[in-house]
Image (cartoon, rainbow, N blue to C red):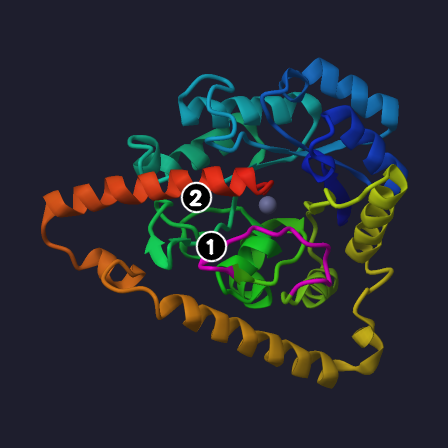
């Protein structure tokens, strides 16, 4: 059975109770709790009380995102992940969403896949590694994540597919879903257009159907292949001026997740039109990717493994880490979420 849930981050900057309330009013099947500095998001008792009050089961827990929640559950990322799994277990959630480590998280990054496996076994909940994207700062690639941003090529059993991140990384989410097969266990329902503004990246989390990703096709693929997992809305509703406006956006997203309503009316036009549209979008994505890559010189992804000087690599690494932190700060200031 596929359940369509809503992340509490959809109502940001409103709090977690507003997340439960909006999810219930918009007709979702349940909630994904994004663990933040707000202690309510870390307390099983309070979360279960909210779940009961609004009749919204907790489907999944999103482990704290580094840099935004630096001191939540201490500073050890392994403990943060274990605490997330423990929380999931105590509130009856079946999955934990986790981002791949940043490269400078020494000790955690190297052991990440083992830690994911062991935590899964210890707590009996799925740890679904989310696809991220290559960071680009001033048109230069920075290798921010380790072992990488793409769980398709990682040795992990469960993956979260996020459409906004797929768009940013210039990937086709349908191809990713097909490549993942049974390892695809969790979906973040949203969209992205891979838009670039002066070489800066924006993690858009658009409503599904409003970007360039084949969201409908992926959902159809999942529905038709007997997939069972959770599709959780992770959309940006900050432009909504009133509660009604926000609920309208969330209701549309819930309906899209269920396949009840497709905002791009091309569903009725048949596959041919859809495919044509997809290839147009793909071409647009390739063009915008080319634009970025043309600005990349020696620091591009390909050059990363070729360097022989450990010391200069280390120096570059520090610069990259600094650049990524800066980009994170900029993204935060621009009001972006993970
Ligand atoms: Zn996500």
Q: Residue at x 26, y 58 (%)?
A: 299
Q: Which residue is drawn at 70% across and 50% down?
A: 228
User: From the Cβ of disc 1, is ligand 1 less than 8 Å away?
Assistant: no
x, y percentage for residue 196? Answer: 52, 61
Q: Can residue 45 be seen in this view?
A: yes
Write down the region rendered in magenta: 197-211
Q: Is residue 263 above or below residue 254?
A: below
User: Label 2: how many residues lie within 10 Å, few (<14), some (14-19) or many (20+)?
Assistant: some
- Give whichever of 158, 320 is nearer the camera: 320
Q: Quadrant of ligand 1?
A: top right
Q: Circle 2 sits on which residue?
A: 327
Along the horizontal axis of the image, is 281 left or right of 222? left
Q: Residue at x 74, y 29 (%)?
A: 14
Q: Is residue 127 visible?
A: no
Quadrant position of residue 44: top right
Image quarter of the C terminus: top right
How far is mark 1 from mark 2, CA to CA? 8 Å
- Give whichever of 121, 16 is nearer the camera: 16
Along the horizontal axis of the image, is 1 left or right of 312? right
Along the horizontal axis of the image, is 325 left or right of 205? left
Q: Dot 2: what SS? A: helix
Look at the magenta stretch and give its main secondary structure.
Answer: loop
Q: Circle 1 sits on which residue?
A: 200
x, y percentage for residue 211? Answer: 66, 63
x, y percentage for residue 314? Answer: 18, 42
Q: Is residue 161 above or below residue 336?
A: below
């Amino acid at each position: 059975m596929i359940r369509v849930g809503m992340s509490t981050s959809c109502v940001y900057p409103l709090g977690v109770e507003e997340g439960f309330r909006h999810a219930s009013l918009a007709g979702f099947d349940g909630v994904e709790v994004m663990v933040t500095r707000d202690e309510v998001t870390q307390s099983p008792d309070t979360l279960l009380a909210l779940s009961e009050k609004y009749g919204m089961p907790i489907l999944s827990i999103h482990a704290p995102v580094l840099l935004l929640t630096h001191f939540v559950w201490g500073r050890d990322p392994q403990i943060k992940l274990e605490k997330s799994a423990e929380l999931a277990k105590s509130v009856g959630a079946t999955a934990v969403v986790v981002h791949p480590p940043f490269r400078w998280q020494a000790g955690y990054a190297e052991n990440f896949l083992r830690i994911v496996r062991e935590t899964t076994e210890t707590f009996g909940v799925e740890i679904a590694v989310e696809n991220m994207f290559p960071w680009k700062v001033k048109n230069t690639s920075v290798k921010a994540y380790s072992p990488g941003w793409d769980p398709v090529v990682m040795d992990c059993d469960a993956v979260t597919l996020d459409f906004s991140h797929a768009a940013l990384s210039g990937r086709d989410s349908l191809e990713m879903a097909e490549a993942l097969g049974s390892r695809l266990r969790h979906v973040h329902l949203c969209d992205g257009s891979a838009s670039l503004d002066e070489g800066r990246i924006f993690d858009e989390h658009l409503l599904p159907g409003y970007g360039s990703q084949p969201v409908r096709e992926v959902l159809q693929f999942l529905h038709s292949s007997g997939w069972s997992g959770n599709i959780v809305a992770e959309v940006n509703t900050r432009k909504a001026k009133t509660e009604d406006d926000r609920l309208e956006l969330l209701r549309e997203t819930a309906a899209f997740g269920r396949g009840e309503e497709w905002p791009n009316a091309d569903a009725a036009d048949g596959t041919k039109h859809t495919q044509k549209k997809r290839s147009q979008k793909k071409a647009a994505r390739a063009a915008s990717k080319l634009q970025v890559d043309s600005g990349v010189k020696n620091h591009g992804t390909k050059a990363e493994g070729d360097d022989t000087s450990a010391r200069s690599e280390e120096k570059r690494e520090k610069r990259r880490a600094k650049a990524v932190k800066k980009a994170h700060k900029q993204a935060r200031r621009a009001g972006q979420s993970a």
